[in-house]
Every structure is written in structure tokens, then in C-alpha cells.
Image (cartoon, rainbow, N blue to C red):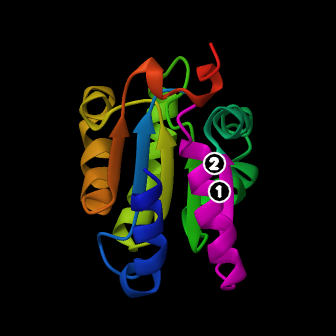
Amino acid sequence: MKDMATKYYQAFDKIKNTRQNSIILCGNSGCGKTHLCIAIANNLMKKKKKVIYMPYRDVIISIKQNMLDAEAYSITLNKYKKVEVLLIDDLFKGQITKSDVNIMFEIINYRYMNNLPMMISTEITIKKLIDIDEAVASRIYEMIKDYTVEILGVENNYRFKDI
């Protein structure tokens, strides 16, 4: 996973405006997905790239609370749609509603159509993403094809290493 994160960071300036400009780290809780995504983000920010961290659950709840206020909803969504690099942490963590999927489609589709990079951490495999929503999954997959890691198994949870 670390090697893929390094490869992505090193290639970023070359790939950032292409269709395949994103990375996804999939795996069990505690395997280092968020740690590596934040390391990439910190290094990109040192290069003056604008990166926004999107903790999925917190942001989805906040966006849904603003749905009745069209202006606030649009401002919040645009923040995640238009930033130079978006780091989505724990995509689809927890109970997933149709509204959650629709919001993520709106953000991901905009980024897909405009070749805007994403770094995604999730406990969900690519195949499970397809089961959640094929349109979201296919856009993500096209963007992360070259930079995908899936690490499964509780033995990869560093939080349990001393048990």
C-alpha cells in the first residue's frame, strides 16, 4: 500500500489532468489507508496543491442538513466538487442511504467530468462499490485504475498487532 501511495505521489504532476489521476486504498480498518492518504495530501500541499479533507460520514450528515437551503447546499457541495484535490476518507462507511449515494454521485461525477483528482480511503472493495451504485463505481474505477490497492483481512489491522 505504501509503495502504491509513493508511486501515485511521484506521478501526480504528470497525471493530475488526465482521466486516471486518482488513487483508492481499500481495506480493513487499521491497515493504514487514512495515514497514507494524509501523507500524500501533506506532500501535495507542500507543492502548493489545494487539498480538502472530506471525512465522509461527517460531511454527508452536514450536507443532508443543508438540503433545504439551496444556497448553503450548493456552496457546501461546490467546495468538494471543485477543489484541486479531494481526499475522501472512509467512503460509504456506515449505513448508506439513497441520498448518500446521490450526493456522492454529484461530487464524483463533477470531478470525473472535469478530470479532478481524488484520493479515497474505504473499507469497501471495488466490487462492493459496484453493488452500492454502478454509476459511482464505474466513474471511480476509471479514475483509479492505475492506483488501486485492496488489503483485506483482520491480520492487516495494525491496531491489533500486539494481541
Q: Residues within 10 Å of mark 2 (few under 14, many from 20)?
A: few
Please report the bounds of the magenta region as a residue range: 30-54
Residue 17's disc number: none
- Give the residue displayed 41% in from the left and 60% down from the top: 3
Q: Is residue 31 magenta?
A: yes
Q: Which element is circle 1 on?
A: helix
Residue bearing mark 1: 38
Residue 130 placement: quadrant: top left
Amino acid type, mark 1: Ile
Q: Quadrant of the C terminus?
A: top right
Residue bearing mark 2: 35
Residue 85 placement: quadrant: bottom right
Q: Nearer the viewer, residue 35 or 63?
A: 35
Q: Nearer the viewer, residue 8 or 57?
A: 8
Amino acid type, mark 2: His
Q: From this viewpoint, is residue 78 visible?
A: no
